[in-house]
Each structure stands twice: as C-alpha cells, then as structure tokens.
Image: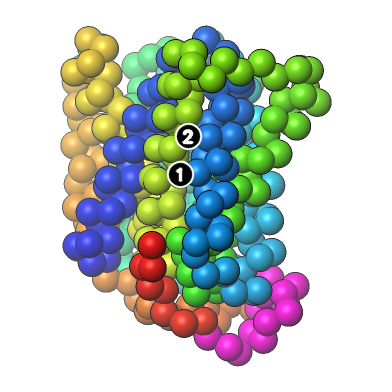
Amino acid sequence: MTAGVVFIVLGAALLHAAWNALLRSGADRFWSIVVMGVASASVALPLTFMLAPPARASWPYIGLSAFLQICYCLVLVRAYREGELGSIYPIARGSSPMLVTIGALVFAGEKLGPLALFGVAMVSFGIVGMTFGRGRPNVSSIVAALATGLFIASYTVADGIGSRLSGYPQSYAAWLFLFQGAPMPLVYFAMRGRLAIDPFGLETLKAAGAGVMSLLGYGAIIWALSLSPMGQVSALRETSILFAVLMGRIFLGETLTWNRVVAGVTIAIGAICLAGASPCNHGRSPAPLSPAFFVCVMISEERVGEVPRRPTINL
C-alpha cells in the first residue's frame, strides 16, 4: 500500500471510531442509525449530479452493497441491545478482515503476501483480544457479533469489486450512500411506525453528524479498495477500534487495562506490517482471474474483458 492510501485509510478509521462513539451515546440507536442514513443520503444526492456516473458493470454491486448495508444496520442495532456488547462487538470487527481476505481470494482471485497476511492476522487477533477478561459472552451475543462481521465482510468485498469496475469510485460511493440511506425511513416505518425527527434537536444533530462522518470515512475506504488489496484495506480500517479505545480513555475516562494495552500494541504491529507489505498480484487496474469473479460480472451488461479506466479523483 502506498503512503497516501495508508494515510487515507487511517483517517477513515478515525472517522469510523468517532461516528460509532456518537451512535453508542444515543438513547435510541435504531432511530439514530436511520437519521444517519437520511443525512448521508442527503449529502450524497447532489454529488450524484456533479460526478460522472459509474460504469454499468458496477451497478449490480451498488445495489447488492446497499442491501447488505441495510441488513448490517439492522444486525448492528440488534447487537447493540446485547448486555455484553462491550465484550462481543470486537469479535465482529476482528473477524471481518479475515473474512474479507477469504472473500477477495474467492471472488476476485486476490492473494496477499506473507507480510500482509501476518498483518491481517495481527490486527484481527488484537481486536478480538480486546474481549479477554470481560466475562464469558452468551450465545446470542456471539451470534450477533459474527453476523455483523459477516455483513461487514460481504459489503466490503462487493464494494471492492464494484469500485474497481466503476471507473469512478467517488461516484460509486455517492450512489451507494443514496441507495442505502434513502430506504432507511421506510424500514423504520415498517418496524416501528411513524418516524419523528426534530431538525434542531441535539440527538438529531449528533446522528446527522455521524452520518456525514460515515459518508466521508467509508467513501475514502471505497477509494482505497479500488487501488489496494481488500484484505489489507479492511484490516487497516479496523484499527478504528484502537482509536475508539483511546477516545474512551481520553474523553470518557474509561480504564485502560493491561489487556487493552497488549491488544493495542498487537493491532499497531499489524497495521505497520500492512502499511509496508506489497501484494502478490494486485495492480491498479481491476483484472481478477477467479472464476467466481466472472460469474458475478456476467450479471451486468458490460463485457468482462473490458478493463475500466484507472480511477481518478474528480471532486
């Protein structure tokens, strides 16, 4: 990974930790995540008119990722209701880089070198290590955590392939946030009834701010996925949990135990390995050779053999 990509992904991880902190502080997290979706979709809407449209081959992946992210939001809210979420949620963040690495291999023929694989493993083990010493989790919370990790990995792989096919990752991200955020009020209405939003309320402003941070953070990740191996990007992104621990210590006065210190050092070592690792077979143009990749691409109208233009930043 280049220094620029590493810097952008770490910045996105910081934004991810910040909006999760805002979401955790909300009284009604389902309502908050719906307002987040409305805010991010509102910001994304004008961008869809300003940016060049993504290539046709990427549209199925935009739709798939939007659906997976809506499911992820519902599972995330369910996971936040678990009494031992503080012990279990790191399992979701820690399992997703491994799952993304496997998914990238199966669906995009993407292989990582030994140093990158070691970095992914270190980040994953460090994140899961955050759960040690907090009591034994119950079965339902483990299932919720693993389901959350599976959805994270699924939409990450979909966006990794889709952003490379799009030719314009920024435009891809704008359409994705529009398709993901716009239906959220309908989901809320179907599950709870009328959605009441006070435009100037503190909780609304907090959730809206989290939505904008989510758009900026994951938009940067989509750009990084178009240029770098998915497993590396995913693992580096999950260093967000390290930022969250530091925020908890500095701003919320949470205890920084030796277990968290050791886990944090493990994550940091993994991040350093990822930053310095070179992929085995990933270039800047999307040319995966896995048969599963070609099966996925055949659902689009664009020819499989046509390589999209190299992504450029045209904001």
Q: Position of residue 94 (x, y in %)?
A: 42, 39
Write down the residue under mark 1: 215
Residue 282 picture quarter:
bottom left
Q: Position of residue 17 (x, y in %)?
A: 35, 32
Name the residue located 68 percent from the left edge and 55 percent from the top edge.
64
Figure quadrant of the C terminus: bottom left
In the image, is 69 to the left or to the right of 13? right
Q: In front here: 264 or 49?
A: 49
* Vertical placement of residue 289 versus 38, above or below: below
Name the residue located 50 percent from the left edge and 44 percent from the top edge.
43
Q: Which mark, by number, is residue 197? A: none
In the image, is 214 to the left or to the right of 69? left
- Label 2: state its secondary structure: helix
Q: In front here: 84 or 9?
A: 9
Number of numbered discs on residues: 2
Q: Main secondary structure of the magenta part?
A: loop
Write down the residue under mark 2: 211
Q: In front here: 105 or 1?
A: 1
Residue 267 picture quarter:
top left
Q: Are marks 2 and 1 in contact (CB under 8 Å)?
A: yes
Q: Is residue 105 visible?
A: no
Q: Position of residue 248 (x, y in %)?
A: 27, 19
| Classed neighbour count for the residue bearing mark 1: other residues with Cα under 10 Å, few (<14), some (14–19), many (≥20) | many
Alpha carbon separation for disc pair 2 and 1: 6 Å
Report the amino acid beneath label 2.
Answer: Gly
Q: Is residue 24 part of the magenta span, yes or no?
A: no
Q: Which residues are magenta?
A: 293-307
Outermost residue on the bottom side: it is 305
Q: Position of residue 115 (x, y in %)?
A: 26, 62
Report the amino acid beneath label 1.
Answer: Leu
* Vertical placement of residue 292 versus 201, above or below: below
Q: Is residue 48 visible?
A: yes
